[in-house]
Image (tube, rainbow, N blue to C red):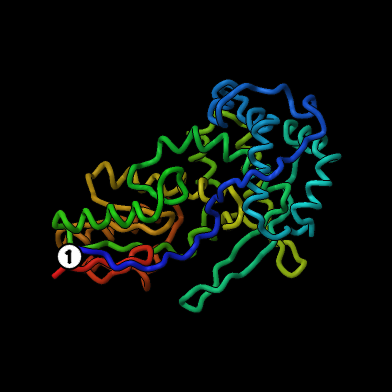
Amino acid sequence: MSKAMRQMPERSGRAGEGRGEAALQLASDEACGPPREHQGTGSAMQEAGAGSLLEAALTRENLQAAWKRVKANKGAEGVDGLDIERTHRLLQTKWPQIRQELLAGKYRPMPVRRVMIPKPDGSQRELGIPTVTDRLIQQALLQVLQPLIDPTFSDHSHGFRPGRSAHDAVKAARAYVQSGKRVVVDVDLAKFFDRVNHDILVDRLKRRIPDKAVLRLIRAYLNAGIMDGGVKVERDRGTPQGGPLSPLLANVLLEEVDKALEARGYSFARYADDANVYVSSMKAGERVMAWLRRLYGKLKLQINEAKSAVCSAFGRKFLGYELWVAK
């Protein structure tokens, strides 16, 4: 059995690699808190201890690493109109005040800027572009939270995770089909990033993050709203693609379905909101699809019935690839 090779489209939200650019030079060590000697952000988190994850995120070393990543990723300006260089100059003087607001729980993120990106099927994907300052803060949070949360995720989850890729998901799918499970339950979620329920997401985060200050800040980002045509639109659901934290938050929410699938011993692969479950018969596939509708429904999510199907795994695209029987 072989796989058809297709060029895979880039997905928004994937972290880029740092390119050695000059890091953000903060006003002073005192403004950032005492330096911590650690190898990577995971060590900073461990030394900070439970209840001080926000402080770990705001250390000088972690912020400089976050700035290098934000700068390497480039990206457009947010609603404040400040690009990376102008934001750099602003933070030279404003960062101590921003840091104090963060630690005091008084920081209020700016709304994200709405951008519509065309999709191959003719529809559009909504992106929410945070300001460069908010991308810096989110990236600093990500570097502390990911080492804490990512190891708890399912091995069947491949999207936006260190050391994993879409190719790994496709290879897993191929192995399942080669083992004889030649019916796929192909699940496409309808406007997933637009429909993430804030209350459910924060509840799941509380089970993983032992720092109320971090939870409060994440809630503030979820509630920041979106700027569309100069008008701020309030949102009580959705985590727009475009910010560094969005992929991690998506995985936290969808992990609940992963664990349910694992508990029943199903063979599946998930990449962000694209999930395929492999079974041995159409009848079994229909049962799984009905069950998944209930699971996603409990999370206030909907399956896109027009794009989802129970069908032969051969010829059905998964992340741009197809499987077929080699002659």
Quadrant housing the N terminus: bottom left
Vertical order, 62 against 318 (above or below): above
Determine which residue is flagged by label 1: 282
Q: Nearer the viewer, residue 180 or 15?
A: 15
On screen, residue 285 versus residue 138, left or right, reads left
- Locate the C terminus and report the quarter of the image it occupies: bottom left
Q: Residue 258 in the image: x percent, y percent?
A: 35, 47
- Where residue 278 sits, quadrant-wise, is bottom left
Residue at 36% across, 53% down: 270
Which residue does the image show at 65% across and 22% down from the upper left? 36
Residue with the most extreme front position: 20
What residue is shown at x 21% (from left), y 68% (from top)? 324
The answer to which quarter of the image holds residue 317 is bottom left
Question: Percent position (x, y) of residue 59?
Answer: 68, 29
- Work out whether 306 lies above or below 157: below
Q: Position of residue 263 (x, y in %)?
A: 26, 41
